[in-house]
Image: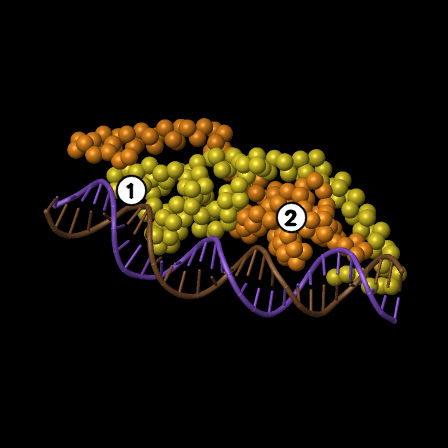
Chain colours: A yellow, B orange, C purple, D brown
Amino acid sequence: MGMTITTMSALAEPNRLHIVELLRDGPLTVGEITVQLGLAQPQVSKHLRVLSDCGFVEVHPSANRRIYTLQPQPLIEMDAWLDSFRRMWEERFDRLDDYLKLLQSKEEKQSSTEGAEDK
Amino acid sequence: MGMTITTMSALAEPNRLHIVELLRDGPLTVGEITVQLGLAQPQVSKHLRVLSDCGFVEVHPSANRRIYTLQPQPLIEMDAWLDSFRRMWEERFDRLDDYLKLLQSKEEKQSSTEGAEDK
DNA sequence: TCCAACCATTCCTTTACAGGCATATTCTTT
DNA sequence: AAAGAATATGCCTGTAAAGGAATGGTTGGA
């Protein structure tokens, strides 16, 4: 819900993740990003296009250049998505984990009669 | 840092994202996941392999089956990574945004002397 | 012991995508 | 007006990865 696939796949690309991290410290032009990434300019433009389509960045043209600014929306959505899991590790994930370890040890006790274990 | 690329690319795949969401409600066997996803069993096993390599899930064999359990670690790392951005939208992203709009309007005032505007 | 169920692995094919390169576009400068 | 930055787009190619199908390996049950 809201957590689209494209949001994740945008960040799955190393260079795009890097761009997002760069823009965390403030807006940058394409040229500046290109230098930081050590990539060719066309590739950077393409990555920025993808990030733009996902709502990760916004452009404002300034003279010859284009200034890219990070947009918080997709990150906020990621945060919301993580929320449903946060309970899992905050309200003691251990309880479930302990329960499973209990089950497992019970089974290991069975199979240990022939001395063969998996792995 | 710690926020690896592979963590993102694991969730970039729709079916894997779905698996993670399924496991949020509790451990499942391969067969159960296969039914839910409507995929062939081998593909599910492959996706689970990827998730396992990224530390997203853990397996404990139980008789004939294999029970997959969601592991919080990668999600915790995502959460930590998001932390550095959280300030951005909590402590007013607008200030920076306003500053940029100021810069932009300043430049537009320059170029408006010849009456040409972008957009 | 033999068969069936459950799951992992392998091979093959196809497709999506990132990089390289050339080019188009827009703005600035002279 | 011409030339030169800064950026975007299009085409081509290689590669990684996902799905399909077959197979191998365990475990449980008859």
Residue A84, percent from left and from top:
63, 36
Residue A51, percent from left and from top:
43, 43
Taking the spot 86% from the left edge, 55% from the top edge, the residue there is A109
Question: In the rendered picture of this protein, how many numbered marks are placed on residues?
Answer: 2
Spatial CA span between label 2 and label 1: 46 Å
Residue B40, percent from left and from top:
65, 55
Taking the spot 67% from the left edge, 35% from the top edge, the residue there is A87
Given residues B78 and D24, the one toward you in this image is D24
Quadrant where the image shows the C terminus of chain B: top left
Residue position for label 1 = A65
Q: Are marks 2 and 1 in contact (CB under 8 Å)?
A: no
Tell me the kind of residue under disc 2.
Leu
> Would you say D15 lies left or right of B39 here?
left
* Marks 2/1 same chain: no
What secondary structure is found at the residue carrying circle 1?
Answer: strand
Given residues B45 and B53, the one toward you in this image is B45
Chain at numbered mark 2: B
**Is B81 rendered above or below residue B29?**
above
Query: From this viewpoint, is residue B47 visible?
Result: yes
Tell me the kind of residue under disc 1.
Arg
Given residues C22 and A80, the one toward you in this image is C22
Query: From this viewpoint, is residue A32 visible?
Result: no
Taking the spot 74% from the left edge, 54% from the top edge, the residue there is B66
Residue position for label 2 = B37
